[in-house]
Image (tube, helix red, strand yellow):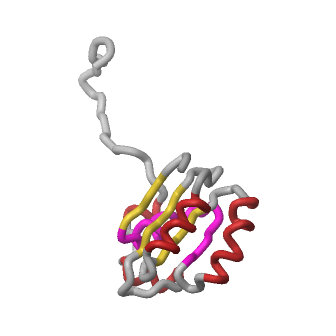
Amino acid sequence: MIGPPLQAGPHATFTVTGIPLMPGFSSPPSATDSRAMLGLDADAPVVLILGGGLALGVDAVARRLLESTPRLQLVVMTGRNAAVRDALVPLAVRHDPRLVVCDWTDRMEVFLAAATSSSASQAV
């Protein structure tokens, strides 16, 4: 703790909330439903690749995983980086339906629920 604890009056109330989240996280969809929403195979593993709002390094990670793991499905979030999204379109066409490329979303609970695992990185 930094500094002394706060002194509360006799009628003070405190509510512990944790980290504020989007409403969808309170009751996320099942993995099966999420995968159906994203057009993914319900039985194959799914890796969610996140690179932040700039999507740094996600294209290189996607290429490596697609080349090395034939059964793996990838969902790549390109944030607000249109150049990375555009660079991944030919790869998505070539590896359809194994690669799903998505922009920024306010429905992250769907993507996280669909994933078997996730990778978040700011660089490769």
Depth check: 5 or 104 in front? 104
* Residue 34 quadrant: bottom left
Residue found at x 51% / y 73%: 67
Residue found at x 58% / y 63%: 77
Side of 102 relative to 118 (left or right): right
Residue found at x 47% / y 66%: 48
Give the vertical position of 118 relative to 116 (above or below).
above
Q: Position of residue 17 (x, y in %)?
A: 34, 44
Q: Is residue 103 magenta?
A: yes
Range shown magenta = 99-116
Depth check: 25 or 37 in front? 37
Q: If the image is split into quadrants, where does the N terminus sit? A: top left
* Residue 76 quadrant: bottom right
Going by the picture, which residue comes out furthest to the left?
10
Residue found at x 56% / y 77%: 99
* Residue 93 quadrant: bottom right
Q: Position of residue 39 (x, y in %)?
A: 53, 85
